[in-house]
Amino acid sequence: MNLNTNSFFNSTDIHISSRMNEYLKKNFGYEVEGDFDTLKEAKQSLEAEQVELKSDYMSAKYIENMLMIETITSLLKSHGESTSPSHKQEEVVSEETPEEVTEDEEEKGIEHYRYKNDSQLANAKDKLIACMAQLDYAIDYRAKNSHLFFNTGDKAGTGDLYRMKEQLEKLHDGWEEATELYGM
């Protein structure tokens, strides 16, 4: 059975919870009307705003913006829509091995490479901060609902999650020292 032939998956309507719509409207000024176009439009605006906030990537506004973009991207993916960035952002993070320096790039000077290095580290630090925030939500959820995880009367523990959080916080606290540029 091919699920993609189901009319649910072929629909151009998307159902957004009233809470999410209220949140979007209150915090970002967007209201999604239940179709892909308005959702994509909201995503485009949020991505443009994210570029402006890039210089203050530690702010709550930047993180909130980034998380909302991820939420919208997940909604679009679940409906089979394209989720590529809607505008050009400088993307310096790569899962591939670093590229070799060409002759043209050699002429750019050390500032170019330091800037790229700083950009990559800033992206990694953004993801670390987002990871810590998401882990906080997971810890809160498990703590509030620990009695509901088992039918035996046992409660779900949070100790290991708190230890993970401490390790991430140590990583974050020592970030500047650990990522300092040095020569060999």
Image (cartoon, grey):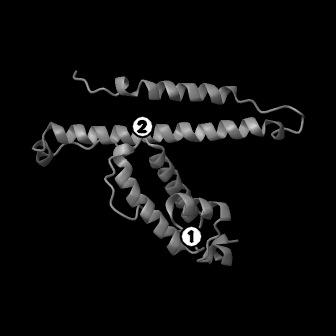
Q: Amino acid at mark 2?
A: Lys
Mark 1 or 2 closer to N-term? 1
Vertical order, 106 against 33 (above or below): above
Task: Please say whether residue 85 is visible from this viewpoint.
Answer: yes
Does the rendering let one see residue 82?
no
Q: Residue at x 54, y 25 (%)?
A: 167
Where residue 135 appears, as percent x and y from the top left, is 60, 37
Q: Residues within 10 Å of mark 1 (few under 14, many from 20)?
A: many
Q: Find disc 1 in the rendering and name its residue.
A: 32
Do the residues under discs 1 and 2 have CB atoms within 8 angstroms?
A: no
Question: Which quadrant of the rendered structure holds the C terminus?
Answer: top left
The picture places residue 127, in percent across and down from the top left corner, at: 46, 41
Q: Nearer the viewer, residue 43 or 95?
A: 43
**Distance from the alpha carbon under mark 1 to that under mark 2:** 31 Å
Q: Is residue 125 left or right of residue 147?
A: left
Task: Name the residue that disc number 2 marks.
Answer: 125
Amino acid identity at mark 1: Val
In the picture, the quarter occupied by the N terminus is bottom right
Q: Is residue 146 left or right of residue 81?
A: right
Q: Residue lying farthest right?
A: 152
Q: Secondary structure at mark 2?
A: helix
Q: Please, is residue 25 above or below residue 59 in the view?
A: below
Numbered marks: total: 2
User: What x and y, as percent, mark residue 147?
Assistant: 83, 37
Label 1 SS: loop
Residue shown at 59% from the left, 28% from the top: 164
Q: Could you classify mark 2 by the number of other residues whose Cα lies within 10 Å: few (under 14), some (14-19), or many (20 or more)?
A: some
